[in-house]
Image (tube, coloured by chain):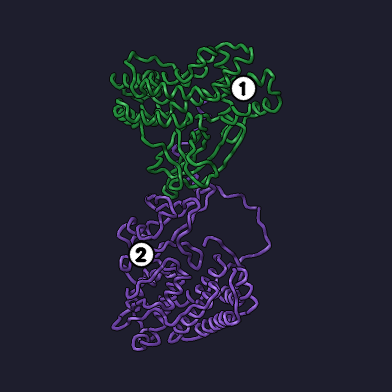
C-alpha cells in the first residue's frame, strides 16, 4: 500500500458521502458563471469559491461592470463545512509535526496564503472520521515527514515560524519557476557543492521535506476536490494524446509535455489538476499521476482544438518533488 | 506504407520500369530471395524473370496501341507483373488457374454499369491475399465499374464530373505538418455527395484505430493520428493521401488496395474490349457522354502508376519520382512562422509560475 493507493480508497469514500451530490451541483453551477471563472484562478479547490464570495465587493469595484451574485447561504455553509473537512484532513496528516516541529505547521498549510473568514458550520461529511483517520495514518508514513522528524532529532537548527514560512515559500517558488524540465541552479549548487552534513545542506534538507509535505497535501486536497466532481480521474492515453513532447528526468522529479485532443476523457484541464496517464509509449510505469503545471489551449476552424500540457509527475507519496527529497 | 523514397527522374514511367527490370535478372532475384530468407530454385527464378520481362513488354505494347486493344494488353501486363511479384515476395509460384472473376456486360449502356463478379480461387483472390491483406472477396457478389472507378484517387475529379450524383469511394486528405501537433484534415466540401460527414466517416475501415475522434469544424474534419497507430489510406500518383471507403458486400466491409482495384478495372476494360466489341467499338468511336475521357484517364493512370504501386510493394516503401535540383542545401530561407499563429484562437495559456 502507498499514500497514493490510500488516497484512491479515500476518494471512493468521497463518492458515497452524503453531501457529494449537492456539492457537485453547487460547484458545477458556480463553475458555469463568472463566479466560477474567477474562482478557477485561485487554484484552491473549494476555498476558491469562498474567497471570491468574500472578496465580492472589492472585485466588483476593480472589474466594473462585473456583477458577482453572492453565494446563497446554504451553499456557503455547504462549501465552508466541506473546506473545513479538508483542512481537518491536512491537520491530521501532519499531526506528528505539531509536536516535533510546531513552528513549521503554518509554513506547510496549502491554504496559508488565503485570507478567508469561514462561517460557523456543523462538521462536514465528505470525509468521515474513520476515513480521515485512515488517510492520516497512511500520510504519517510520508518520507518527508520522516525526514523532518529525523532532522529535528539530529540537528539543533532553530528557526522561527516566520522563517519557515518564508523559506518554504521561496523554495517552492524556486522549484516552480525552474519549470518541470529543470532543477534550479541554487538547489543543484547545494546538492553538489555542500557536504551532506554541512549546515546549509541540513537546512536545505529540512526545507525540502517541508516543501514536499505541503505539495503532497495540496495534491491530496486536489484529489478530494476532483473526487467530489467526478468518479474518474481525467485520463490521457492513446485515445486522446496527439503527441508526446519534451520529457525530463531531473534532480527534482519527472517532467513531461504533451499535446492532447480535448474530449470526453479530458475536456479541458486546469492548472493544478491531477491527471492519469496510461500510455505504453511514454516508457514510464503505466498509470502514473501527473499534475498540470502549465497549459496552452488552441482552437481554430482550420486546425481544430488541442491543448498542450506541461506536467510534473506525482509519485506514490503524492510528492511532485520526490527525486529532490531522495537526493538532498 | 509510411516509409517514403524519393527518386530524381525526368521520366518516371521509364525509370520505374528500370527499377522493376532489375528483377528480370537472376542475380538480383536470388539476392532478393536471400535477403528475405526465401529459398530459390532455377524454375522459380526463371518464372519471376520471365514475368517481369513479359510485363514490361505488355505495358510497352499497350502504350503504343490504340484504345481498341490497349486495355487487354494492359491487363495482361498487370496480371503478369502481379504473378511475378507474388512469386518473388512469397518465394513460390502461385497456383493460379483462372482470372478469379467474370465480367457481366450484357445490355450495359455505360462502362459504369459493367459488373465484375469474383469467383473461385483464381488470380483475383490470390493476388488480394498478397497485395490487399484482409480483403477477402465474396464469390458471386458483383462489383460495378462505377464503384471501382470511384475508388481510384487519381480519378476522383473526373469520376465526379462524369457520373453526376455518383458517390466516390475515396476521400482526399490534406496533411498539415506543424511544429507541434501535425494533423490530417478533410475539407467538408469533399463530402457533399455523402448523406452526411458522419456517414462518410463511418464507411472508412479502421478509422478509429488510426485516428482520434474526428473533430468537425465549419470547414474541415480534423483528424489527429493516434500515437504509433498503423497508417490507413492510400496515396495518389501526386502524393496526396486519400482515405478509402469500404464496399459493403453481403454484410462484409471490403477495402481493396489500389493495386487490386486497378487490376479489377483493367480486367473489366480488357475483357469488355476483347469480348464485347459490339459495345466497345461504338463507345470508343462515338461516345457522347464523356465517359471515354474517364476511361482514357484510367488507362493513362494505370500505365504510369500501377507499376509504381507494385514497385512500392516490392521495396516496402512509397517511391516517389521527383524532378528537382540535387546537391543544394538551402538554409537561407528563414523558418516559416506557423500559419496557425494568426488564425488560431489562443483561448488560454497559463502556468503555475504565473501564480507563484
Which residue appears at 36% of the width and 70% of the height? B161
Residue drawn at point x = 52 percent, y = 35 percent:
A313
Q: Is residue B12 above or below residue A71?
A: below
| Residue carrying label 2 | B253
* Residue sitting at x 42%, y 52%: B222
Chain for colour green: A
The chain carrying label 2 is: B
Pick whichever, A313 or B259, lies toward us: A313
**Chain identifier for the purple-coloured part of the image:** B
Check whether the beta carbons of the residues at disc 1 and disc 2 lie within 8 A of each other.
no
Q: Name the secondary structure under disc 1.
A: helix
Image x and y of residue A177, in percent = 57, 29
Q: Marks 1 and 2, Cα distance to the nearest angstrom?
A: 64 Å
Quick check: can you spot residue B145?
yes
Residue for badge 1: A205
The residue positioned 63% from the left and 18% from the top of the image is A203
Compared with A279, A275 (above or below) is above
On whether disc 1 and disc 2 are found on a single subunit, the reply is no
- Badge 1: how crowded within 10 Å, few (<14), some, or many (20+)? many
Image side of residue B219 versus residue B108, left or right: right
Residue A259: give x, y in percent of width and height. Answer: 49, 43
x then y, percent, for residue A84: 38, 18
Residue B171 located left or right of residue B16: left
Question: Percent x, y for residue A174?
Answer: 59, 26
Amino acid at each position: 500500500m502507498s499514500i497514493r493507493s490510500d488516497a484512491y480508497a479515500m476518494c471512493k469514500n468521497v463518492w458515497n458521502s452524503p453531501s457529494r451530490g449537492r456539492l457537485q451541483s453547487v460547484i458545477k453551477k458556480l463553475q458555469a458563471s463568472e463566479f466560477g471563472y474567477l474562482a478557477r484562478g485561485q487554484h484552491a479547490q473549494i476555498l476558491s469559491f469562498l474567497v471570491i464570495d468574500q472578496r465580492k465587493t472589492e472585485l466588483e469595484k476593480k472589474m466594473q461592470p462585473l456583477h458577482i451574485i453572492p453565494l446563497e447561504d446554504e451553499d456557503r455553509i455547504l462549501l465552508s463545512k466541506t473546506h473545513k473537512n479538508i483542512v481537518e484532513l491536512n491537520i491530521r496528516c501532519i499531526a506528528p509535526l505539531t509536536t516535533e516541529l510546531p513552528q513549521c505547521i503554518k509554513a506547510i498549510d496549502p491554504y496559508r496564503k488565503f485570507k478567508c473568514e469561514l462561517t460557523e458550520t456543523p462538521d462536514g461529511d465528505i470525509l468521515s472520521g474513520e476515513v480521515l483517520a485512515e488517510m492520516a495514518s497512511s500520510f504519517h508514513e510520508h518520507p518527508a515527514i520522516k525526514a523532518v522528524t529525523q532532522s529535528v532529532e539530529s540537528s539543533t537548527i532553530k528557526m522561527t515560524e516566520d522563517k519557515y514560512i518564508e523559506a518554504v515559500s521561496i523554495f517552492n517558488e524556486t522549484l516552480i519557476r525552474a519549470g518541470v524540465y529543470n532543477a534550479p541552479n541554487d538547489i543543484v549548487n547545494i546538492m553538489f557543492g555542500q557536504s551532506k552534513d554541512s549546515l546549509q545542506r541540513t537546512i536545505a534538507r529540512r526545507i525540502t521535506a517541508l516543501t514536499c509535505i505541503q505539495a503532497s497535501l495540496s495534491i491530496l486536497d486536489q484529489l478530494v476536490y476532483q473526487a467530489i466532481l467526478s468518479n474518474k480521474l481525467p485520463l490521457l492515453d492513446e485515445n486522446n494524446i496527439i503527441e508526446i513532447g519534451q520529457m525530463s528526468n531531473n534532480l527534482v522529479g519527472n517532467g513531461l509535455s504533451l499535446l492532447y485532443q480535448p474530449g470526453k476523457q479530458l475536456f479541458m484541464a486546469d492548472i493544478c489538476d491531477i491527471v492519469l496517464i496510461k500510455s505504453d509509449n511514454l516508457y514510464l510505469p503505466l498509470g502514473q499521476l501527473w499534475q498540470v503545471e502549465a497549459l496552452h489551449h488552441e482552437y481554430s476552424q482550420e486546425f481544430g482544438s488541442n491543448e498542450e500540457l506541461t506536467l510534473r509527475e506525482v509519485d506514490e507519496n503524492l510528492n511532485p518533488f520526490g527525486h529532490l527529497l531522495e537526493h538532498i | 506504407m509510411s516509409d517514403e523514397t524519393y527518386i530524381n527522374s525526368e521520366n518516371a514511367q521509364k525509370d520505374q520500369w528500370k527499377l522493376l527490370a532489375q528483377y528480370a535478372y537472376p542475380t538480383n532475384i536470388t539476392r532478393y530471395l536471400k535477403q528475405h530468407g526465401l529459398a530459390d530454385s532455377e524454375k522459380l527464378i526463371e518464372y519471376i524473370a520471365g514475368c517481369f520481362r513479359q510485363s514490361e513488354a505488355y505495358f510497352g505494347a499497350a502504350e503504343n496501341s490504340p484504345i481498341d486493344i490497349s486495355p487487354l494488353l494492359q491487363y495482361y501486363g498487370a496480371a503478369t507483373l502481379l504473378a511475378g511479384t507474388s512469386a518473388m515476395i512469397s518465394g513460390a509460384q502461385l497456383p493460379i488457374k483462372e482470372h478469379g472473376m467474370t465480367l457481366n456486360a450484357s445490355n450495359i449502356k455505360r462502362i459504369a454499369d459493367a459488373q465484375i463478379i469474383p469467383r473461385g480461387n483464381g488470380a483475383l483472390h490470390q493476388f488480394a491475399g498478397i497485395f490487399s491483406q484482409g480483403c477477402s472477396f465474396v464469390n458471386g457478389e458483383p462489383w460495378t465499374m462505377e464503384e471501382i472507378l470511384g475508388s481510384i484517387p487519381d480519378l476522383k475529379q473526373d469520376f465526379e464530373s462524369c457520373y453526376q450524383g455518383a458517390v466516390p469511394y475515396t476521400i482526399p486528405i490534406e496533411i498539415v505538418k506543424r511544429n507541434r501537433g501535425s494533423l490530417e484534415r478533410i475539407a467538408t466540401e469533399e463530402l457533399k455527395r455523402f448523406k452526411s460527414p458522419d456517414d462518410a466517416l463511418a464507411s472508412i475501415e479502421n478509422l478509429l484505430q488510426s485516428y482520434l475522434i474526428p473533430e468537425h469544424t465549419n470547414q474541415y474534419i480534423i483528424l489527429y493520428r493516434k500515437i504509433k497507430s498503423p497508417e490507413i489510406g492510400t496515396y495518389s500518383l501526386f502524393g496526396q493521401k486519400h482515405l478509402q471507403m469500404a464496399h459493403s458486400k453481403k454484410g462484409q466491409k471490403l477495402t481493396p488496395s489500389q493495386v487490386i482495384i486497378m487490376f479489377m478495372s483493367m480486367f473489366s476494360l480488357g475483357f469488355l474490349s476483347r469480348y464485347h466489341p459490339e459495345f466497345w467499338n461504338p463507345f470508343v468511336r462515338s461516345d457522347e457522354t464523356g465517359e471515354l475521357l474517364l476511361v482514357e484517364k484510367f488507362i493513362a493512370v494505370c500505365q504510369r502508376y500501377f507499376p509504381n504501386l507494385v514497385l512500392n510493394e516490392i521495396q516496402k516503401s512509397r517511391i516517389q519520382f521527383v524532378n528537382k535540383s540535387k546537391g543544394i542545401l538551402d538554409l537561407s530561407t528563414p523558418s516559416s512562422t506557423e500559419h496557425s499563429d494568426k488564425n488560431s484562437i489562443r483561448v488560454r495559456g497559463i502556468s503555475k509560475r504565473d501564480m507563484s
